[in-house]
Image (spheres, grey):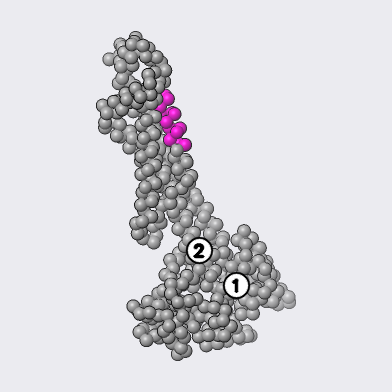
Amino acid sequence: MTFSEIFRQAFATFKAHKMRTFLTMFGIVWGIASVILLVGLGRGFTVDQKKHMESLGKDLVIVWGGRTSAQAGGLAAGREITLTIDDARLISNECYQVKSVSPELRRQVPEVSAFNSANRGVVGMWPAYQEFRSLKLDSGRLLTDEDEKESRRVVVLGSAAQQQLFPGQPAVGSMVSIKGVPYAVVGVLEKKNQNSNYSGPDNDYLFAPYSAVARDFPPPLKPGIVKGYLDDIVFQVADPDSHDDAVLQVRRTLGRVHHFEATDKDALFIWDTMDGAKILARIFDFVTLFFGCVAIVTLCLGGIGVMNIMLVSVRERTREIGVRKAMGATRRDILRQFFAESALLTIVSGSLGLAFGIGVCILAAWVPLPDFVPHPIVSVISVVASVLTLSLITLTAGMYPAQRAAEMTPVESLRYE
């Protein structure tokens, strides 16, 4: 038998059993599409969460002062460690494993514009802060080194602060009174979708040069503490793979001037965001793997359905097999015929499933979704896994029924009722 005759007979069989063919193909289509969609959703969640983590800042470490838990340098345990602007400068000058650093001085003060008033926080920081804290500009400009050096009274507004102080009005170029001190608005930030923060969403804040905030809105004096103390210090590590070494270097540097050991974990409270990012990545890798396994099982069940349907077909066509063998059809002819039918079913169904799954992922990228629902991302791994699994199903689901049919003898087949 030629291949054209084999496929012609296969299509004739499918046409004669339309509903059976449709249900069999649907199982494979759904299984392949499930692999693409579920793995795509898992991949989408991973990328989306990574993006949200990076919205807090890239390779970021936040440091707060704590209390010593051990004696050091002849000083008693339980001392409060207060970070100052000198500490930020020391880290910048001495810690070579730190790429960028900035102080943070947060002041909760009233703001008044020509259109509205607010009581939002003002953050005093160095210009480098804007880059490693992922503050993206919507209009105007960001703060510069000259702004910090000259202690200029300029401010950049978060998106929520801009909407409250200048509802429906252009903010850049306008003035805002911060606790009675006039500041010029030089920029407005893009709206940021954050799933983590350490002092409130960036959208809510006003950002100004540290030197200006420290001069105009100094924090209350603490007994025994010189002027210039901070809420915290934020820095970006130079090499994310060596972030633990960078944190240890900062502990040692600050421990030297504040008289505590680097091993005293209570002396400084440190949030290393890269630790959280790694844990989150592992969780979502597991979720993606779980989705993939569920989808592969679904696909295998579809393959079992194909094999069962083909076994039923062999049983129903027993007399046909006997007639064909009596008329000269060889064992190889019967084997090729039934294998071609099952292979054609799985290949066509698999191709439709791939097209459907990839098509849905591509179309979903154009559909606006809520912030908590990520767009599925087509994964090369899922496509390759689908093709390999489909090939395995084609062999197992096709060969076994085909061998059953080929092994029938003409006499037994013609006696079958």
SS for callout 1: strand
The residue sitting at 73% across, 77% down in the picture is: 74
Q: Looking at the rendering, in which quadrant would you find the C terminus?
A: top left
Decide: few, some or many residues near mark 1? Use Cα within 10 Å; few <14, some 14-19, many ≥20.
many
**In the image, residue 85 lies at what x, y percent?**
61, 80
Vertical position of residue 203 compared to residue 287: above or below: below
Q: Looking at the rendering, in which quadrant would you find the N terminus?
A: top left
Is residue 87 in sight in this rendering? Answer: no
**In the image, residue 353 lies at what x, y percent?**
37, 41
Is residue 403 in sight in this rendering? Answer: yes
Label ID, residue 54: 2
Give the magenta part as a residue range.
Answer: 388-402
Q: Say which amino acid is labelled 2.
A: Glu
**In the image, residue 232 lies at what x, y percent?**
57, 75
**In the image, residue 21 lies at what x, y percent?**
30, 31
Q: Are marks 1 and 2 in contact (CB under 8 Å)?
A: no
First along the sequence among labels 1 and 2 = 2
The residue sitting at 49% across, 83% down in the picture is: 154
Decide: few, some or many residues near mark 2? Use Cα within 10 Å; few <14, some 14-19, many ≥20.
many
Which residue is farthest bottom? 180
SS for callout 2: helix
Vertical position of residue 78 compared to residue 338: above or below: below
Label ID, residue 101: 1
Q: Say which amino acid is labelled 1.
A: Val
Q: Which secondary structure is most common in the magenta stretch?
A: helix
Determine if the magenta segment contains residue 398: yes
Q: Residue 409 occupies which quadrant of the picture?
A: top left
The alpha-carbon separation of the residues under discs 1 and 2 comes to 17 Å
Image side of residue 93 versus residue 390, left or right: right
